[in-house]
């Protein structure tokens, strides 16, 4: 926290709100009990604005802006929920489902998946886009963990927690666009990685079933959500 940051006042959904100038719209919304959907964002990790679900409207600009990387400004007017935003967010969710093979009924994360929960909460009923059904592998070479590219939404939470919190830099993203894949080391099998510390942080921050722990029941994995506040404390240097 920047102690010298100025206080700015602006409107969010018609409410007059005060915030520090170093706070993002998403942080201010969360502090004021206003829900903005996110997938790539995770408190404690650097924000990247990649999933675009947290887009909001700012008056006097026709473009939507990502609330996780847009800072509060004096006099701005923010709208976090509108018919336009609702349609946009549902379209994004549909694209996530069309891009990979998200078959919830046979997924290890069924019932605790953030992508699945958002489809319910935001009212997505079906996918309007043609499915790509990509042929992507499952890497089960690691002694403890599994990387299933079919479930991956490329939020890079795993990449960031591995680099920023664990400091191992084992995970990364290879290529671009539709061919993008999470890789370990120099695109070698996870089980042969010499940098992986087997800490499991990547598995615990994954919002879908792309990363899972072998031999764990869904309920056991859900308990480890308590791991998230730990990330925040580490990021703020309080531990």
Image (cartoon, rainbow, N blue to C red):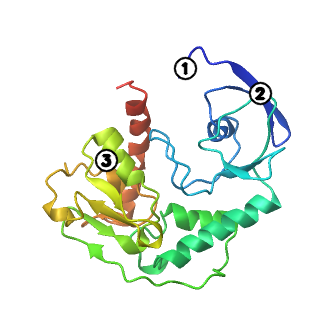
Q: Which residue is mark 3?
A: 162
Question: Quick check: 18 left or right of 2?
Answer: right
What's the residue at 67%, 39% (across, down)? 25
Q: CA distance from mark 1 to mark 3?
A: 26 Å
Residue 141: x %, y % from top left:
18, 69
Which of 37/72 is in front? 72
What's the residue at 32%, 49% (across, down)? 201
Which of 189/214 is in front? 189
Which of 73/37 is in front? 73
Which of marks 1 and 2 precedes in the sequence?
1
What's the residue at 46%, 72% (across, down)? 178
| Above or below, comparing residue 84 to residue 94 in the picture | above
The image quadrant that residue 210 belongs to is bottom left
Q: Secondary structure at mark 3?
A: helix
Q: CA distance from mark 3 to mark 2?
A: 36 Å
Q: Which residue is mark 1?
A: 2
| Above or below, comparing residue 4 to residue 177 in the picture | above
Q: Which residue is mark 2?
A: 74
Q: Secondary structure at mark 1?
A: loop
């Amino acid at each position: 926290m920047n102690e010298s940051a100025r206080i700015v006042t602006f409107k969010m959904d018609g409410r007059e709100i005060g915030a520090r100038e170093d706070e993002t719209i998403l942080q201010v919304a969360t502090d004021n009990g206003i829900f903005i959907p996110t997938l790539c964002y995770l408190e404690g990790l650097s924000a990247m604005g990649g999933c675009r679900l947290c887009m909001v409207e700012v008056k006097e600009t026709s473009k939507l802006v990502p609330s996780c990387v847009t800072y509060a400004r004096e006099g701005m007017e923010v709208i976090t929920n509108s018919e336009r935003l609702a349609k946009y967010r549902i379209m994004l969710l549909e694209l996530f489902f069309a891009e990979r093979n998200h078959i919830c009924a046979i997924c290890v994360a069924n019932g605790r998946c953030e992508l699945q929960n958002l489809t319910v909460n935001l009212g997505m009923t079906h996918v309007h886009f043609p499915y790509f059904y990509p042929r992507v592998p499952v890497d089960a070479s690691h002694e403890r963990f599994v990387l299933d590219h079919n479930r991956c939404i490329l939020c890079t939470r795993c990449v960031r927690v591995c680099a920023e919190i664990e400091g191992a830099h084992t995970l990364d993203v290879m290529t671009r666009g539709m061919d993008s894949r999470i890789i370990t080391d120099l695109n070698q099998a996870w089980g042969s990685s010499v940098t992986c510390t087997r800490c499991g942080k990547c598995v615990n921050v994954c919002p879908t079933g792309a990363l899972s722990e072998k031999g764990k029941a869904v309920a056991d994995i859900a308990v480890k959500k308590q791991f998230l506040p730990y990330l925040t404390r580490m990021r703020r240097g309080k531990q």
